[in-house]
Image: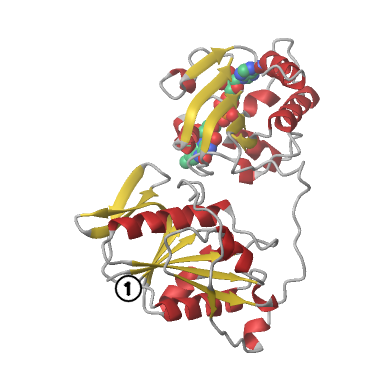
Amino acid sequence: METILVLAHTENDGSLAKSAREALHAAATLHKSLAGSRLVVGLIGENVQAAANSIAACPAQKYLGVTGADFSQSRYASDAAAAEAICKAALATVVVAPATSRWARVLPGVAQRLGGRADTHVTGAAMAEGKISISRWFYRQRMEGALTRTQRPWFIGIDPGSQTACDCGAGTAAVEMVAVNLTDTNKRTTVIGMRAPAADAQTIRPDAQLLFVTGAGWTKKQADGQAHLPEAEKLIHDFLKLSRASLGSSKSLVDLSGEGQAVLPFLSHLNQIGQTGATPRHAKGLSTCCHGEEPHTVGWRFIGERRAVNLDPNCGWARGKADVLYVADAFKVMAKVNELLAAGKT
Ligand SMILES: Cc1cc2nc3c(=O)[nH]c(=O)nc-3n(C[C@H](O)[C@H](O)[C@H](O)COP(=O)(O)OP(=O)(O)OC[C@H]3O[C@@H](n4cnc5c(N)ncnc54)[C@H](O)[C@@H]3O)c2cc1C
């Protein structure tokens, strides 16, 4: 009999992130299709009662918690000790957790301590021929693999954005506390604060509906023989502000800044989409001034509806990479789009 443990940590405000609800959805679906299995929720944070209450209507038989000021922030030693204690208390055979940066660096270590195995970047979990089967992408998202394991406990890190978030309602959950005695060595690392870009400077927005991609064309000489960088910067910045889209880039554009050329100041290699960049998940994507070559578009694997604006009717997007290609000047198109957005007409 499998005991499926959903392991989650609370956010700073004591709530559960969407990624935690996605992991819960994946675990509850497994539990439903696996007769005789148990579902346990394990929560870690300064105080977990509000988080447990927020999902009290989920089909879990038990809620376990490790709480206290020592567990409020991400720290390998205390997080690993807490996760290990909860896994033991739950007698967990399968551990489903959101692959947040906090869990991603801790759970493989916990699997090692418990003699288990960990799989990362999991995008699906289901029953197949009576066994739990997980799927993940390989070779920069070009191939999808499905695998099963006999080793237990089995840690499954669910990629945020790959599942529907569970919508189980709130109530009152009885949380059983698990004691964890941290040693001084466990507390050697002290978290002194968080540094994050101002909301306006944060251009990577995983929860945005739209991925807006900028390519090297924004920096190229235009019909008048001149490059128009300040204008490009303003158009892109205004569009991001008005649409709250997530900003992606081609490799050529982010590489330009590495070579010391004046480019868009709000772009870094973290924005790069593609084979050597990111493969984000968004409902829609709009590419501008980017050629749409294979090493770039492979990063669009998980983008629902794809559109591109390019002056070149023979660009890569025209060859089956986009649903709609506007053969047009992106400077003009985006100026008009911004005008409509500002007027509330879209
Ligand atoms: C091993 C390897 C890995 C790679 N990995 C990646 C990766 O992860 N991500 C990635 O992006 N690339 C990657 N590349 C590079 C990729 O092959 C391309 O070179 C790169 O994507 C090109 O960037 P671009 O389309 O922005 O620039 P360009 O190829 O220079 O295209 C610019 C486009 O802008 C258009 N344009 C210019 N002005 C306008 C205008 N006013 N309006 C509309 N359109 C306009 C032009 O028509 C042109 O199509 C990789 C390459 C290799 C070899």
At a point 76% along the width and 28% down the height, the residue shown is: 238
Amino acid found under the numbered disc labelled 1: Arg
How many numbered callouts? Answer: 1
Picture quarter with the C terminus = top right
State the residue in front, 126 or 122: 126
Spot occupied by residue 341 in the image (x, y as percentages of width and height) = 72, 21
In this rendering, would 176 be left or right of 147?
Answer: right
Which image quadrant is residue 236 in?
A: top right
Q: Is residue 61 above or below residue 285?
A: below
At a point 64% along the width and 36% down the height, the residue shown is: 247
Spot occupied by residue 72 in the image (x, y as percentages of width and height) = 67, 71
Is residue 158 among the parts visible in the rendering? no
Q: Is residue 37 above or below residue 57?
A: below
Is residue 91 among the parts visible in the rendering? yes
In this rendering, would 212 be left or right of 297?
Answer: right
Spot occupied by residue 205 in the image (x, y as percentages of width and height) = 64, 42
Name the residue at the left extreme. Answer: 129
Picture quarter with the N terminus = bottom left
